[in-house]
Amino acid sequence: MSDVPFGFGPSDRDPDRDRKRDEGGEGGNEGPKDPFGFGNLPGGGQFPGIPGMPGMPGMPGGPGGFDVGQLGQMLSQLGQMLSSASQAGGGGGGPVNYDLAAQMATQQLAQKTSSLTDAQRTAVADALKLAELWLDPATEFPAGAAESVAWTPTDWVKASMPTWKRLCDPVAQRVSGAWVEGLPEEIRDAAGPMLAMIGQMGGLAFGSQLGSGLGQLAAEVLTGTEVGFPVGPERTAALLPEAIEKFTEGLDRPASEVMIFLAAREAAHHRLFAHVPWLRERLLGAVEDYARGITVDTSRIEDMARQIDPSNPASIQEAMQSGMFEPQTTPEQKAALARLETLLALIEGWVDTVVAEGVGERLPGAGALRETLRRRRASGGPAEQAFASIVGLELRPRKLRAAAELWKLLGEERGIEGRDAVWAHPDLMPDTDDLDDPAGFVHRRESADPIAELEKQFAAEAAEAAAQEKPEEPGTDDEPGAASGPGAGDESTEERNGEDEGGSPRA
């Protein structure tokens, strides 16, 4: 993943590592992979681990040394960041300065994009309209998008900012505050004003990193849902014609065919999220669950601080490279990441299956395009970059393929209606173990009606709630077993319960 917070830059993954990760070896779901760039700091790299000051420029130098000549450059970059922040206005009240992030991203994109033409807008509208028609027979979910738009990369940044705020705030808040919570109370009281200033600086630094990352990601995304879910306004299907044209240049397929295939994926995502109301909150909730567990071992910081020689800059750099500010991963965080990865895989697998059924026989190159997008994800596509940077999650291609196989098998066994009915409630969804055995999950579901199961579960929950709310039969203190008032001759609650549970009255 990226070495900086929110660093959505191009992936530089090692193919051998990816193969091992895909086979369940190195890089599995044992925990986050250095979220927010708290890990190693190669010479000349970034210096993200300073409490409250993530993403400060690095301290480059030779092996074991510190190049003092670079200090002026570091301070200059800090000054530029502060200057940009003042020009951006507000937005500094939270853990991330989003005004600064938006300004930096749009400035970064200014020289890379141009205005859309009427022909591009028409092509997007026509492609989405045709895609909706082709998807109708492939899913029970009706069209979910009420509006079709063409976006420039800058449009994507502006439209997606509320979503990034929801995703980034929980993690940034915990990263910024975890180390402060571990300080003794007397130190926090004494450093109150300084902590507030450092918190504001942290918001600027996070905003700077997020803006840079979004600027890079916006130049790559092809649709409004390529990160795995809709990032723009609800029920707004969006394609980015400029990026799609660049993407098409490397393919041996007509531009119109590529546009329709991507439109079908965009439309399928919106159908799913529009008609599965719990899905978006469950996905964002997994990120929040992960964030709640972020802590920093301050005792380790104290131990490392004792080993630092202030007169030796190399010892300071060595301490920072040791990951002294790296959050400690908890079992709860690992579980949250597993839920997040499984849910993202199920979303992608369902979209992949539905689009293949909807357009597979209509577009000659649908199979090739499907495989191209799979390779794009496996090598580090927008979704992989985003979640790796925010929570350190690396999506395994094997999980995505297994999810697509599960939905395909489920459709063959139960039909389209039975397949889509699984989305009716989160308790019906496959879990991580089911992705390891898609056929097993399908066979268990073969004789079961998902809706009937759900209704049975609701009935059981309602009965349990009613039993807990039912008042006890009145009695007297002198005669605990006697009833009073109307219906005193009725059998007692205890006797009725005995009859219900045992099938006959108690002796």
Image (cartoon, grey):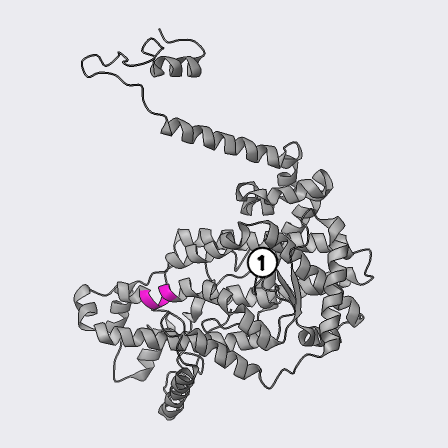
Per the rendered image, the range of residues in magenta is 173-177
User: Which x, y percent locates residue 185?
Assistant: 19, 64
Please tell me whether residue 398 is drawn above or below residue 413 in the rendered image: below
User: Which x, y percent locates residue 476?
Assistant: 22, 16
The residue drawn where x is 59% and y is 68% is 382
- Residue indicated by mark 1: 396
User: Which x, y percent locates residue 156?
Assistant: 58, 72
Is 336 in front, or is 265? 265
**Quadrant housing residue 235:** bottom right
Is 122 in front, or is 26? 122
Give the amino acid type for the residue marked by disc 1 in the picture: Arg
Q: Is residue 28 magenta?
A: no
Please tell me whether residue 132 is drawn above or below residue 49 in the rendered image: above
Label 1 crowd bin: few (<14), some (14–19), many (20+), radius 10 Å: many
Q: Main secondary structure of the magenta part?
A: helix
**Quadrant housing residue 452:** top right
* Quarter containing the C terminus: top left
The residue drawn where x is 52% and y is 63% is 387
181 with respect to 203 (left or right): left
Q: Is residue 401 visible?
A: no
Q: Is residue 143 visible?
A: yes
Q: Is residue 176 magenta?
A: yes
Tell me how many marks there are: 1
310 with respect to 253 (left or right): left
The residue drawn where x is 61% and y is 42% is 422
User: Which x, y percent locates residue 267?
Assistant: 68, 59
Local SS, label 1? loop
Please tell me whether residue 64 is drawn above or below residue 286 in the rendered image: below
**Quadrant housing residue 48:** bottom left
Is 144 in front, or is 433? 144
User: In the image as oriented, which residue stretches furthest toward the front?
Assistant: 486
